[in-house]
Amino acid sequence: MTTTTRTIPAIADQIVLVTGGARGLGRAITEAFLREGARVVIDYVTSADAAAEIVAAHPGRAVAVRGDVRDRAQVEALFAAGREAFGAPVTTVVNNALADFSFNGDARAKADEIDFPAFAGQFASAVQGALHTVQAALPGFDEAGSGRVINVGTNLFQYPVVPYHDYTAAKAALLSLTRTFSADLGPRGVTVNMVSGGLLRTTDASAATPDAVFDAIAAGTPLLSVTTPAEFADAILFFASPWSRAITGQNLVVDGGLVKD
């Protein structure tokens, strides 16, 4: 059996698409890649001002493009804009976009009242969005000789401390997609991994979470802290880097040690 060795570009040589990359966790991921020298396509839907602010702070290394990942044509336009701006294909995709969601345990839909459209909405964002971005990325990955896909997950399907039924089910399905796509795309030099966080302190989605909940989570971790968006983004960088070249189909939980498996 022949072993194929592919050269994985350093982060500074990568062109990265971050979906939902202008605010919250997405902004932390975008800024982490920019800090390391990468060029970034910032996908956004409603955060035009925030996206423009990032671009202005990193002239020539960031481009902001409005695109709903649920729409395949808009996703194709994201990749086209990246190539036009940087003269080369996107080499790394971070699937972070999240349909409107608030981590508010008191306001969540309970098991006896949630309806399937709530699930469908989350699946469209998490699973359909990732399907669109990966498929749109493949011609560029083939051109570059390798590719990186990093999906953003959650520890809630291992430890549903708050049962957000629709959100958690969609992220569990995204983990399945991560593993099956890794098997199919590995021969093309593409790795597909997931980084799963717990509640992050603080993003737009977790802004409604009471301090008491954050404190209770922190008390249950070995590090006695709640993971920040910047800490989570560092783990994303690992899966984009050459250091992870032999890792695919994996789910790394980044939550201060709250979940052990």
Image (cartoon, rainbow, N blue to C red):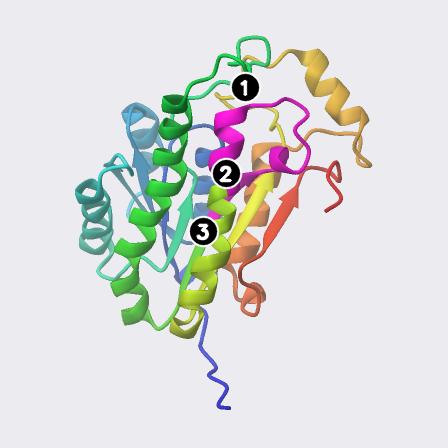
The one nearer the camera, 1 or 255, is 1
Magenta span of residues: 150-172
* Chain-order first, disc 1 or disc 2: 1
Specify the amino acid type for callout 2: Lys
Question: In the structure shown, which secondary structural element does the residue marked by tag 1 occupy?
Answer: loop
* Chain-order first, disc 3 or disc 1: 1
Any magenta on residue 99? no
Q: CA distance from mark 1 to mark 2?
A: 14 Å
Q: Report which residue position mark 2 lands on.
A: 171
Tag in front: 3 or 1: 3
Quadrant in the rendering for residue 83: bottom left
Q: Report which residue position mark 1 lands on.
A: 103
Say few, some or many: other residues with alpha carbon within 10 Å of mark 1 (under 14 / 14 to 19 / 20 or more): some
Image: 185 above or below 23 = below
Specify the amino acid type for callout 1: Phe
**Residue at 47% in and 28% down:** 24
Say few, some or many: other residues with alpha carbon within 10 Å of mark 2 (under 14 / 14 to 19 / 20 or more): many
Q: Which mark is residue 177?
A: 3
Q: CA distance from mark 3 to mark 2?
A: 10 Å
The one nearer the camera, 15 or 4, is 4
Say few, some or many: other residues with alpha carbon within 10 Å of mark 3 (under 14 / 14 to 19 / 20 or more): many
Mark 1 in CB contact with mark 2 (< 8 angstroms): no
Place of residue 78 in the rendered image (x, y in percent of width and height, measured from the top left): 23, 45
Q: Residue furthest bottom?
A: 1
Tag in front: 1 or 2: 2
Any magenta on residue 156? yes
Question: In the structure shown, which secondary structural element does the residue marked by tag 2 occupy?
Answer: helix
Mark 3 in CB contact with mark 1 (< 8 angstroms): no
